Amino acid sequence: MFYVSHWFPQTQISPKEGWQVYSSAQDPDGRCICTVVAPEQNLCSRDAKSRQLRQLLEKVQNMSQSIEVLNLRTQRDFQYVLKMETQMKGLKAKFRQIEDDRKTLMTKHFQELKEKMDELLPLIPVLEQYKTDAKLITQFKEEIRNLSAVLTGIQEEIGAYDYEELHQRVLSLETRLRDCMKKLTCGKLMKITGPVTVKTSGTRFGAWMTDPLASEKNNRVWYMDSYTNNKIVREYKSIADFVSGAESRTYNLPFKWAGTNHVVYNGSLYFNKYQSNIIIKYSFDMGRVLAQRSLEYAGFHNVYPYTWGGFSDIDLMADEIGLWAVYATNQNAGNIVISQLNQDTLEVMKSWSTGYPKRSAGESFMICGTLYVTNSHLTGAKVYYSYSTKTSTYEYTDIPFHNQYFHISMLDYNARDRALYAWNNGHQVLFNVTLFHIIKTEDDT
């Protein structure tokens, strides 16, 4: 099914300017979600009764939400009232004791009495709010009862034909939203949720990935354990086979790899050759190297690694735009350099020099031409810095994520799955991402 929810985020762009879409790969039940704020429309302007019905329905929905909030708060405050009642009974008993034994009253009794009164003071405004909420709930219920009667009358007046017309308009909107989502590719990272643990295997360090350019039926998984002294790549036909350990094939690469920052893109594996700044392109279908090229000036062999080390000097990644290399050079004072690569020849097409130290980065990944950098590989890590290759500008961010197993040695974005693949201390996990999109409509000038 196609799920659409309407809400109004705090942003300087009004709904008049175009579609605003918060898209998320999936919810906890695995369903795709697209949250949309639609531009103002006049679909029903010619139909006064339909417009009146829609406005009243919106009012009822708003009131229903208000009642739900008030009801929750009333239930909460009721617990405070019960507590107050218990303490009042305790005070009553204490006063009776004082009345019965005035002459032998000790200082201790006065102190206990004072403490009880201090506890009651904060409950007084709560009780007042409780009374106010109760009155509001009564008013809301009465107003909704009146509105329901009006809506029933309007519905009988409109008849079945107008209802079908409105239903068709809803279906038309849903179709347009589906088309919109097909065209939807890029957006700004807003949130990271998860992780979902797919499997626990291998050493503390490694990489696992799928091909973002593969067809929907092709769900092969590739698995590369450790960050050095290994040449074996294991292939699985699906995530299910990966979880069960049913290998479909193994590849013995001609060179050992360095680090864990490899990427599979359009049927080929791109990796950093051990003890060098050479990038290798290896075709899985042909079983051989198709291209190799030195990444000029790039540090290697733990000269400019991520915070966790592991020969993670050169990070290869892919997004909606293409193939990228992230590394550091002496010429850029050890700060991160972003290079867009030709996927066939591995030539650098264009580079951007940032001011963020590579050794201070926990991991990084590209989404829609923007590099997102984490500030650590340990507990408390968050996306702290981003650099847009579109505008050649950077900003500091604060996007936390749950580092469940305390040590991340690989974090890569997959554009097809709209997810982050991670190797977390011997656990293969997935993070869901939420992106913010602005889509101009045909009527926009």
Image (cartoon, helix red, strand yellow):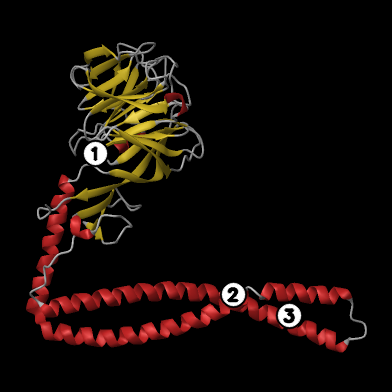
**103, above or below 374, in the image:** below
Mark 1–mark 2 Cα distance, whole angstroms, equals 50 Å
Where is mark 3, residue-wise? Answer: 90
Mark number displayed over residue 416 = 1
Query: Disc 3 versus disc 2: distance between alpha carbons?
Result: 15 Å
Residue drawn at (43%, 82%) of the image? 136
Amino acid type at mark 1: Arg
Which of the two discs, 1 and 3, labels the residue nearer the N terminus? 3
Q: Secondary structure at mark 2?
A: helix
Q: Percent position (x, y) of residue 74? A: 49, 76
Q: Residue at x 58, y 77 (%)?
A: 125
Give 66 or 253, whichever is nearer the viewer: 66
Q: CA distance from mark 1 to mark 3?
A: 64 Å
Instruction: Say which label, 3 or 2, has the lower sequence index.
Output: 2
Q: Is residue 135 left or right of residue 190?
A: right
Dot 1 or dot 2: first in sequence order is: 2
Left/right of residue 407 with respect to residue 433 in the rendered view = right
Rendered image quadrant of residue 443:
bottom left
Q: Which amino acid type is shown beneath numbered disc 2?
A: Tyr
Q: Going 30% across and 74% down the picture, which residue do you hit?
A: 61
Callout 2: 10 Å neighbours few (<14), some, many (20+)? some
The foreground one among 301 and 426 is 301
Residue at 33%, 85% in the rendered image: 143
Q: Is residue 300 visible?
A: yes
Position in image of residue 200 (x %, y %):
44, 34
Q: Marks 2 and 1: in contact by CB < 8 Å? A: no
Indicate the quadrant containing the N terminus: top left, top right, bottom left or bottom right.
Answer: bottom left
Element marked by disc 3: helix
Mark 1 and mark 3 in contact? Answer it, CB < 8 Å: no
Residue receiving disc 2: 80
Residue 222 point in image, percent of width and height: 31, 28
Where is residue 229, by image quadrant? top left
